[in-house]
Structure formats: C-alpha cells, structure tokens
Amino acid sequence: MSSVWSFIQNQVLGMRWLNDLVGAGLTQIGIDPAGYLGGSLQFFIYDVIKIFILLGTLIFVISYIQSYFPPERTRAILGRYRGLKANTIAALLGTVTPFCSCSSIPLFMGFTRAGLPVGVTFSFLISSPLVDLGSLILLTSIFNLEIALAYVVVGLILAIFGGALIEKLGLGTEIEDFVVGSGPGQEMDTPDLSRSERLDFAREETLGIARRVAPYIFIGVGIGAAIHNLVPQAIIEALLGNDNPFSVIIASVLGVPMYADIFGTIPIAEALHLRGVGIGTVLSFMMAVTALSLPSIIMLRKVVKPKLLGFFVAIVTGGIIVIGYLFNAIEHLFI
Amino acid sequence: MHIKVLGSGCKSCDTLTERVRQAAADAGVDATVEKVTDLAEFERYGIMSTPALVIDDEVIMAGRVPKPKDLVKMLERRG
C-alpha cells in the first residue's frame, strides 16, 4: 500500500519522470544536467511544466467546488454561529470560497453589514489565501502528505485563533465608520448555477488565474532554479540554514510584503528545501508570502483602521513565525 | 441603458469594463458605461465580490468576468 502511495507522491504529483525526461532530453542535445547551467535549465523546464499542469487541473477542480460557495452563501451560513465555532466555520469556509484579494473590501463590508463579528471576518480573511485544496496538493507534491496535512491544520488554527484574538482584544470597533451603520443594502439574488454554468465558471477561473499567475511562476521558478544550482551553499546556510536561529524570522519578514501566488512560491520552497533549509523556515516563507502582502494590506486599510490593521499583521506574522519554529523543531518526525 | 462596473482597480475590473464597452457596441445598444470605485456605492448595491456588473441600478452579477459573447447576448436581451 505504501509503495502505491509513494508512486502517487513521487510520480503523479511530483512528476519525477518529467524531471528525468527533461534531463535525458538535455543530454541528447549536448547539455549536461549535472553542470551548473544544465542543472538550472533542467529544473526550470521541469518545474514550469509541472506547475502549469498542476495549476490547470487544480484550479479547475477547485473552482468547480467553489461555485457552490458564493460569498453570500458563506455569510448566511456564518450568521448562524457564535463564538469560536463561528471562527472555525469561517476559517473552513475561507478555504472553499472563491476570493481574489481585490474582493476583500466588499466582502469585509458585506460580512460586517450582516452583523458578523470582525474576528469571524478575519478568520475568513486569514485562511482564504493561506489554505485550500490547492496548497494541500502542492505541498504533498513537494514534500509529503504528512507535512501538507500539518500545514493545513496549523494554517486553520492560525486563522481561527488569530480571528478570535482580534475579537478578544476589542478591536471590533476599529473599523472605518462608513462600513457600519448602513442597512443591508440591495440583497442580490444568487440563483443556483447549472452544471454547465459551473463548468464555464471553472474554465474561466482556470484561464484567468493561469494568465494572471504565469509571470509569478516564471519568476518563482527562475529564482528556484538559481537557488537550486547557482547560489552558494554557504549563503543559504548562513541566512536560512538550520544553524541560524533567526532563519524563520528572516524568512517570514522577507515574505510578508511580497505578493506572489502560492504557485509561484512552490519552486522556491522546493529549491530551498533541496538545499537543506528547514521545513519550518520554508513553510514560514510560503505562508508569509501568501497570507499577507502589501497590496492586500493597502486594500484592507480602506475599511479597517490602522490599529486593527497593525494588530492583524502582527498577529498573523507572529503566528507564522511560531509555526516555523515549531515545524523546524519537529521536522525529524516528518521526514 | 446605464451600466456600472464596480471594482477597486484590479485587473479583472478593467477587463470587465473593456468587455462591457465592446459588448455594448457589438450588441448595438445605447449605453453609458461607468467604472465605479466609490466604496459607498459597493455598500449601496450590497455586493460582496468584485468586479460587479450593475445595469440600470440592478445588480446583474458579481465576482466573475463573463465571456464577451455572453455579455453581448445579455445586453441584446435587455436592449
């Protein structure tokens, strides 16, 4: 049974055969994959193809599922729960609701208008970019299933308790005035979509996202290839290696203002891990890049006052750092 | 026909605006197309995701950018 799973992990998701194929192809045309240039080229070609295949398939499937969860429905569901349970459901729903970060403003306004506590909205906003089926499968392809599951669980915990903490700190009042107070507004009729409409939606999302994300993938793979073969081991070890007690903090702080799709972080995560960087440090970097970004923070500033915004960034960053150290410490349990 | 595209300036909002303008021309309807970034308007129409398409004060859809030919068909139906 475990050899079947190994096969799935290494060949279906990890596509090692593709790496071998590219290597063989390069050798055929006279480029040596064992050398610096050849190695980078092999990694680049293999990774780009692999990511696009994974990306296309994943987004299509996920979008189809997400068509069942428009934000209006999420809001209605959340209205029925209180307390930590509401945070939990919000975090879970965040993983299946289609959501581009430019929607964070109307979504925030919509949730608040319906009377949902700010903490619940934030649980949703934290888990949404951080955790979804896509990241689960990607992490399985780079590392293994145990780590992927652990990442998802830990990401959800961060979302749940991050949101709850924000509420507990009494930051619920730190929203811009215009958000609270107006009535429910025009309630949009959201009829259920037909099967073919769902397929259309899934296809549109896949093409749209693939187009938008493509530059990040190329850049990410480029950086990954450089890390893989060109950056001297000494630098990597000094900055991000396990002997550096600040590696997690460095990775997190570097990642926070950056904006990249999670798919773009994979090749970098892959390359770093192959060069010996600890799992926790790698995960922290990925989480920091996806959970927070300068553009989304700027967006949120329009609906949320600086104090709440500051706490939000601090709590999420702090949580990511803690998670990073935790994973580094228990790494030997997973590998 | 007065069409509003509600969005905060990300790429899909621009794409929808372009497509709507083109679709209006293709469908031969007389329409003004307005790009709206004012948050009070978002509030007023109760939308939860952007970009959103509002025609003659009625919210038609939100959170997706339909294919050009679907837009044309829809505008022809309303026109």
Image: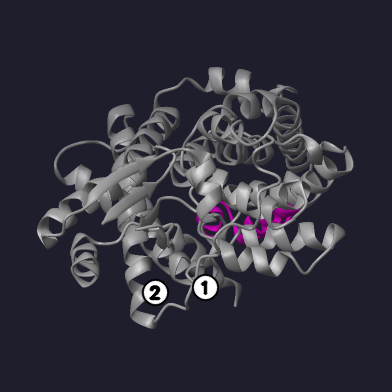
Which residue is identified by label 1? Answer: A68
Q: Is residue A204 above or below residue A261?
A: below
| Chain containing mark 2 | A
In terms of depth relative to the viewer, which is nearer, A277 or A221?
A221
Q: Position of residue B26 (x, y in %)?
A: 10, 58
- Amino acid type at circle 2 is Arg
The dot on residue B75 is: none
In terms of depth relative to the viewer, which is nearer, A294 or A168?
A168
Q: Is residue A115 above or below residue A302?
A: below
Mark 2 falls on what kind of element? helix
| Chain containing mark 1 | A
Q: Earlier in the sequence, mark 1 or mark 2?
A: 1
Q: Residue at x 52, y 73 (%)?
A: A68
Which residue is identified by label 2? Answer: A198
Other-residue count near label 1 (Cα within 10 Å), few / some / many at <14 / 14–19 / ≥20:
some
Highlighted magenta segment, given as a residue range:
A137-158
- Is residue A208 visible to the viewer in this orientation of the structure? yes
Magenta highlight: main SS: helix
